[in-house]
Image: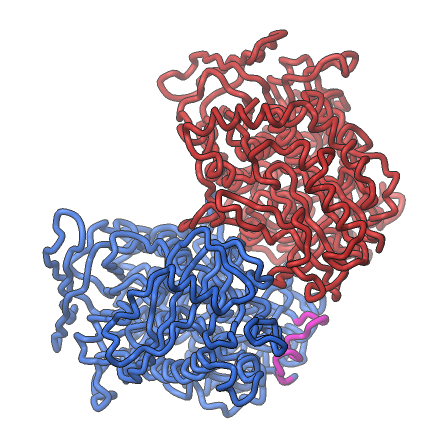
Chain colours: A red, B blue
């Protein structure tokens, strides 16, 4: 965490100074906004939290409810989501209050007496160390609270606008704010009254019954065969010994339970199989009472017993697997001919069972994927074509999720005698662990993802997959640092220079690359960073040497890796790293001893791997992504528009995002 | 973190429900209080934060300043303090924003050119892994902020009362509130007006010029020979390569610097040697300007240069080593004949150099030592004689500190040619590392510390030293848990039962001890827990089995280790642990395979080690500590006084402190 570089910060360094539109942010929803987000669930809130880091962008997030979510809904947090929380600064805190899954137990009919269940197997949750972060269970309400805290402490001081329901929208062909959205007040004196807001872009994160989706002519398509589950969050006294362990329980008489222990040491969630829903059910299954759910659970759990002392929440839901064919307002036959203005994310795009614990996680990655792209386009860093990559990248991920969940939820709902092999369920769980942990996402080559010509130079950083962090030593203070944990959600591209074998200061491919990065007009840092902004404002350039930290002389390190920051032009020492001999990142991530450049997107996905000598490829990679605007123009506009409110330097401090006022 | 056991908690589980005196806490300082703390520095704030956990106790903390501390003063945080922060729930957060010391560098005159300095040595800060927590540097202001947050989220909703200066106090011989304190308003309309508060106990944490100390006839005694240092917190551009590393710098021409990098990646503190202060100096050294300090620093740093861009804070101080002979109002010749009513802590008791980074740390341990004792006496858990152990335990610690600091600060101020050996400074640093890390404290046998008859049963838990945590596996959910991290600052005694080799449920010394703990009238849990309170309200009893977690059947574990909690009488599963085969706590802490009982105080110090069969010794250990009051009486009084405000169960939820209203 870096601070004090614009002068002494006395209070909580996590609370950034208000800047740009955050300085006099109107409490009332304004008539004109840059981005209007509909729905304050996980997809909407992460997109809002990301956009809140851009001081020049007015983002508002409207929610039908009158206030924060109190209880219920999703609770599974895959390790990829915890990595993402780290980028937003609250991983440690949510880990401390969450339930952590380290094992899963599988209970089946006792072979000696199939009327009873018995523990058949245990499976370790993450045997391969797929992430340095754990797999968690915590109520969605707390996840949203943390994102709200990030927004509130951001330069833009963003707060959700509660009490507005989306009604309809209209997209004009031209104009500064082409999307006209009609909202309806849901509470207070104006309840029932309509309200119009005009936006440059709209994100519909308004759930499975999304009206934003309807308004852009998208439909959810997929199977209509439904299986019903009773779900309850309860406080119980029981003799079941694994009550604090995640369990899949299959009874002999038929009937299945998924048991998910919850945060706090006492509460748990149970998904209780209520069977196939008849085609003519007409919603009757939803009238299943909590008493019926508990009775059914006790049947399945025999010989163990649940004495339910308190019911915190319960519901009945029917599983359907449905998906939209696009995530924005550009019909598939018009892709490439125009760029989108309206997007949808999360449950608005994909619905499926809750039991793989995926929904909230995939939804958040939807919002994380879109947030920075909207920021970059609205700031003029990038062309509007960037926005077409959102639907292209995320729709296929949702398709994969639904395929996975169909298989998992069928296995979960099967009777033991329906399985080809008695261990089919646990085998599937172990075999596919990378998917539910969130690490199977691999974006294909595109504007944002390079072809894997030089993948061999860094085999542990597959192009298109998320950057898997490892520990290195920060040279200036000999601190062990998780390299990826500096990739905070600040909207910056990252360029990691893994050095060749030469020492710092020696003439080498690394030092020649450093010189090019710092001085060449072709260098993305030189070409695309706005004039007057800190060198690190848009690009975070780091070097990792092969020597241990005592073998790197800070005085000899090229200034490309020691950029000046802030009004005092201080040296940023936190760009220079050394391999930790006890766990060498070059070994762990398969990095060639000749060195490599690894380019990482603002949402933590590896965009490209290049040789240290590939300066023209590096320039060419960024040209179409960043080449939309002349940085000089951007800079001067920004300085003018912002400087009346606060010194640009102070504004930059807020986020490491420089001169972000202009569009 | 345990919650939901009194019903669903929707918001931040760290914010405990208001209870007892916190329900209608008056914003204005009341006329009668249980404890009045004078001074909101580290000693006062930790004592207040500890007392804030006792719902029935009215504690107020007054501070001369009009608001929170903004800058300056102490910044060294030893690992023992970070352990303590963990107990108060904010270790992870302060670690994330602090500077972490992993190495110290020693710079000396270059042997080839003594007009220049050169790096002579590096020393790893904690080579032996003395704690799982790091050594940190962070401004005292942030430490105080975190304690304020703990207090605000506590059942008593405590907030410091700013704007009151202590004037004098008077102790009556009798009465409910025998200490009459006169305060003076320092701000607002009433500035200059006097205000009287009557208290049961007073803690003076009002610094080196303590008026509380003066009011009880204590004086600081010690050397008057002073050495002056200029201290500055600055933002600098420099070519000195170790500017982000802790350094002791000795120049050839004489003159020394201690460089302490600070939080945020840019700021650092520098202690610059200003030499011996002449006896007739009359404070002139304090007029040294910041420019003079910077010039002197640049002389010492030659050939490197500091270009100071911003000065956040600076001061000149003179080192004196002074100590009081007692920490309370009972003269040494009256000890044992009466119990104290007024205490002093922190700089009020001990002053010394800042350069070993000890002051804030030792002061916090003063306050932590006293806080729970006041809580237990005021609640009627313990006799007043408990309070005499505070001065007895802490005065000798302060004496040790001053002896250590004299040696360290003399070495720091020495010219290279004055040292017996050129490596004397770094040798001393490495040799004595345990002391400044805070782990040399070992309380001698007393009311609270047993004789070490059975120390051989657990050699890694020395009686009188702090309980050194290790990782174990929580059986119920297979989570790796740092056993000591459950020892939160909730005022409870802890009884760790390290099991013999038998399995859970088998007849064994462990199961016989469990039966005794749960049922014998002699058991401290049975004898001293108030009637109607949860079994774990005053004693936290845990078991650690020698098998791995798959070898412990939760269904067979004795109910002494599965106590019921809260209004729903839920089972607390978080008392049952298993050794982690990869790092077996029995091996790591030298625990006999026949098992052992380890008793740990509310402030984390090991109070006794006993065999599993030593039930009568266990009973006898607690009898004088807890035997002051009949628990039946306490309980019924508490229920009466509290139940009008809220259900006792809900009050208990707040802290794990049961029925705490009665005194």
Please tell me whether residue B586 belongs to the stretch shown in magenta: yes
Instruction: Tell me the quadrant of the picture where the C terminus of chain B can be found.
Output: bottom left
The residue at the point 47 percent across, 67 percent down is B299
- At which x and y percent is residue A423? 84, 50
- At which x and y percent is residue A636? 54, 26
Q: Tally the marks.
A: 0
Picture layout, residue B298 above or below residue A293: below
Picture layout, residue B534 above or below residue A133: below
Give the image quarter of residue A537. top right
Q: Nearer the viewer, residue A328 or A53?
A: A53
Q: Residue furthest left?
A: B193
Asked if residue A11 shows in the view, the reply is: yes
Q: Which residues are magenta?
A: B579-592
Picture layout, residue A50 above or below residue B294: above
The residue at the point 57 percent across, 43 percent down is A88
- At which x and y percent is residue A331? 74, 13
Q: Main secondary structure of the magenta part?
A: loop
Q: Nearer the viewer, residue A530 or A266?
A: A530
Please tell me whether residue B303 belongs to the stretch shown in magenta: no
Give the image quarter of residue B283. bottom left
Asked if residue B599 shows in the view, the reply is: no
- At which x and y percent is residue B402? 38, 82
Q: Nearer the viewer, residue B329 or B535?
A: B329
The residue at the point 13 percent across, 75 percent down is B174
Picture layout, residue A491 above or below residue B223: above
Left or right for B196, reference B2: left
The residue at the point 61 percent across, 60 percent down is A476
């Amino acid at each position: 965490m870096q601070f004090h570089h614009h002068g002494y910060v006395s209070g909580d360094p996590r609370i950034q100074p208000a800047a740009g539109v955050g300085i006099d942010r109107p409490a009332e929803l304004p008539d004109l906004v840059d981005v209007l987000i509909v729905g304050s669930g996980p997809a909407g809130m992460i997109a809002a939290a990301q956009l809140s880091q851009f001081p020049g962008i007015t983002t508002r997030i409207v929610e039908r409810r009158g206030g924060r979510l109190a209880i219920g809904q999703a609770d599974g947090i895959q390790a990829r989501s915890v990595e993402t929380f780290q980028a937003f600064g609250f991983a440690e805190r949510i880990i401390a209050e969450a339930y952590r899954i380290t094992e899963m137990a599988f209970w089946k009919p006792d072979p000696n007496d199939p009327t009873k269940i018995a523990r058949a197997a245990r499976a370790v949750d993450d045997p391969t160390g797929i992430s340095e972060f754990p797999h968690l269970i915590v109520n969605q309400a707390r996840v949203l609270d943390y994102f709200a805290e990030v927004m509130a402490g951001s330069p833009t001081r963003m707060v959700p606008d509660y009490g507005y329901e989306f009604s309809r929208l209209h997209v004009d062909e031209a104009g500064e704010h082409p999307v006209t959205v009609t909202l309806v007040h849901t509470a207070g004196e104006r309840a029932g009254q309509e309200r119009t807001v005009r936006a440059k872009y709209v994100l519909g994160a308004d759930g499975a019954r999304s009206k934003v989706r309807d308004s852009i002519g998208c439909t959810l398509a997929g199977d209509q065969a439904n299986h019903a589950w009773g779900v309850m969050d309860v406080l119980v006294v029981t003799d079941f010994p694994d009550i604090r362990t995640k369990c899949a329980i299959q009874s002999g008489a038929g009937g299945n339970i998924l048991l998910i222990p919850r945060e706090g040491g006492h509460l748990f969630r149970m998904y209780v199989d209520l069977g196939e829903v008849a085609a003519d059910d007409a919603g009757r299954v939803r009238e299943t009472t909590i008493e019926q759910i508990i009775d059914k659970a006790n049947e399945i759990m025999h010989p163990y017993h649940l004495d339910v002392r308190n019911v915190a929440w319960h519901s009945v839901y029917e599983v359907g697997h449905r998906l939209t064919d696009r995530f924005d307002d550009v019909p598939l036959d018009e892709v490439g001919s125009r760029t989108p203005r309206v997007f949808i994310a999360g449950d608005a795009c994909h619905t499926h069972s809750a039991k793989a614990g995926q929904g909230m996680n995939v939804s958040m990655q939807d919002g994380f994927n879109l947030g920075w792209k909207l920021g970059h386009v609205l700031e003029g860093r990038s062309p509007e074509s960037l926005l077409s990559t959102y639907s292209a990248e995320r729709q296929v991920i949702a398709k994969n999720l639904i395929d996975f969940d169909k298989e998992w939820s069928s296995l979960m709902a099967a009777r033991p005698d329906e399985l080809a092999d008695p261990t089919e369920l646990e085998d599937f769980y172990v075999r596919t662990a990378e998917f539910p942990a969130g690490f199977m996402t691999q974006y294909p080559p595109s504007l944002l993802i390079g072809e894997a010509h030089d993948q061999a130079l860094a085999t542990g950083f597959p192009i298109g997959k998320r950057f898997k962090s490892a520990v290195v030593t920060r040279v200036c203070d000999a601190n062990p640092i998780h390299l990826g944990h500096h990739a905070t959600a600040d909207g910056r591209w990252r360029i990691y220079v893994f050095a060749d074998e030469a020492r710092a200061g020696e003439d080498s491919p690394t030092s020649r690359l450093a010189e090019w990065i710092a001085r060449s007009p072709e260098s993305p840092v030189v070409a695309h960073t706005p004039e007057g902004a800190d060198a690190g404002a848009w690009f975070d350039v780091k070097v990792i040497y092969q020597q241990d930290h005592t073998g790197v002389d800070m005085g000899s390190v090229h200034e490309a890796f020691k950029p000046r920051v802030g009004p005092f032009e201080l040296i940023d020492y936190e760009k220079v790293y050394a391999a930790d001999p006890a766990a060498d990142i070059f070994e762990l991530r398969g990095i060639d001893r000749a060195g490599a450049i690894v380019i990482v997107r603002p949402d933590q996905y590896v965009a490209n791997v290049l040789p240290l000598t590939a300066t023209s490829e590096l320039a060419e990679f960024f040209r179409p992504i960043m080449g939309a605007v002349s940085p000089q123009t951007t800079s001067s506009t920004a300085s003018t528009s912002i400087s009346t409110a606060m010194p640009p330097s102070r504004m930059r401090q807020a986020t490491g995002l420089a001169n972000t006022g202009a569009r």
